[in-house]
Image: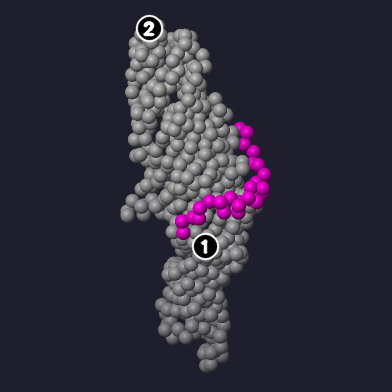
Amino acid sequence: MAGSVSFFFFLSLLFFSSIHVESNEEGYISLDISNKGLDFMKEFLVEMAETSLVPLDLPKIEKSKHIPIIGTVHMVLSNISIDNIHVISSTVKAGDTGIVISVSGAYANMTMNWEYSYSNWWFPIPITDNGKASIQVEGMDVGISFNLTNVHGSLMLSPLDCGCSVKDIFIKLDGGASWLYQGLIDAFEGRLSSAVENAISKKLRQGIVKLDSSLQSLPKEIPIRNIAALNVTFVGDPQFRDSSLVLSINGLISAKEAYTAPPYYHLFASLEHLLASIPLKDPASMVTISLHEKVLASASSVYYDANKMHWIVDKVPEQSLLNTAGWRFIIPQLYRRYPNADMNLNVSIYSPPHLIIKEHQIDLTVHADVVINVLNSGEVTPVACFSTAVSGSASPWISNNNLGGSIGLDELSLSLKWSKIGNLHVNLVRALISTALRTVILPYINIKLSRGYLLPTFHGYMLQNANILCSDSWIKISSDVASVNQLFIS
């Protein structure tokens, strides 16, 4: 919507959309992922591993064994395949050196083909038999540890250790005279266990390499419309704590065509000090995102430099304000010269808005020139220009996965810059505009904001039970994460 409503919606967008657009040259974004959040990620990775590990083919196993009277029996196990893996229990822990994921009590279902042959001196004709077998692997424990490091602004995932152990393996043969040779097959249990352990360990290492490749391919900048670019290079190495993993992102927002990745090592040096200055994260939340107020300054500067802070206001909730008749007692000479003529307002912000995050609110100051245009016989005639300074505050909130809030007007100053219709009573004009803002425009905008805007989803996941807090130059969002389907079902 054009008009003053559009202008003040812009103010609200500066307050609220900056929560999603992240950081500035001296600022940063930090993501503090708690053990609860790591556990969520672990469940996702375990579920992915259960499906991606299978079917897993194992190499052929051959063995010869001398049996009294019968002679030397040669047996081959082939087409050995792990078809299903089921994880019963798993844990994740962030330690001093990295992240450790442990799986205990898992079991797997396998199938294979078997065959044997033997001959002896008293019956030289080879005797052969073959069939299929089903295998149950139980008591399988898997442990994997890996480290995250920063390499040129990207995360590198390096495996530290990976192992698998099998407690029990049960083989059931079908086909031919298999019941006679169950004991012989039991002799393969040790080699089958080793084959399972080695194959799973190897597959997991390959999975980490693939995951690392995916991390390396993540973009280092994200375009914001066609105006700006967000630097999403990681700053410093991830920090592993007793109860969380902390990641920091450079987050510089700059004009898209002028984007260059700045040095970021000095930013990480101040990260510990900055983290210590913000409230502690909610231990019940999966992740806490901390955002410095300089992020907002970065965003407003980019949009200002891109000439995106200019509006023609031609619609307001009280449309009579945009007709000279509505101003006949405030600016009588305007009404006399242009009786009952429609008007619009040309609003141009002439310096980047100034934003400060305080306790429970965000303060904003905007300086703008407002030109009154009269629409006379199809022509646009500028008649006066006012220089304004508007100070307000916003209080954001998150409820039921909706981001909303309210905006209040603190102060409005106004001075006449030029006039083509003679001297004007500036105090009367300021009083009328202030009254219109407080009683018409801002209540209308706050009704819109009170309905909230649904938080975005990311690859089928979204925030759940999110809370937002403003305090001492910081915006902090603490939240859980859940699948969209799970939320709708619940």
The label number, if any, that marks residue 25 in the structure image:
none
Question: Residue 362: x percent and y percent?
Answer: 47, 40
Residue for badge 1? 243
Locate residue 432 relative to residue 129 in the image: left or right. Answer: left
Locate residue 433 relative to residue 217 in the image: left or right. Answer: left
Quadrant containing the N terminus is top left
Residue segment shown in magenta: 257-283
Membership of 265 in magenta stretch: yes
Disc 2 element: helix
Question: Residue 197: x percent and y percent?
Answer: 54, 72
Q: Quadrant of residue 443?
A: top left
Question: Residue 41: x percent and y percent?
Answer: 48, 58
Question: Residue 316: x percent and y percent?
Answer: 37, 24
Membership of 434 in magenta stretch: no
62 in relation to 314, above or below: below
Q: Residue drawn 56% across and 40% down?
A: 294
Disc 1 element: loop
Q: Nearer the viewer, residue 37 or 68?
A: 37
Locate residue 186 relative to residue 342 in the image: left or right. Answer: right
| Marked residue nearer the N-terminal end (1 or 2) | 1
Q: Nearer the viewer, residue 202 or 253?
A: 253
Label 1, residues with CA under 10 Å away: few <14, some 14-19, many ≥20: some
Mark-to-mark CA distance, 1 and 2 = 72 Å
Amino acid bearing label 1: Ser
Label 2, residues with CA under 10 Å away: few <14, some 14-19, many ≥20: few
Quadrant containing the C terminus is bottom left
Q: Residue drawn 39% across and 27% down?
A: 437
Question: Is residue 86 among the parts visible in the rendering?
Answer: yes
Residue for badge 2? 336
Question: Is residue 127 among the parts visible in the rendering?
Answer: no
Amino acid bearing label 2: Arg
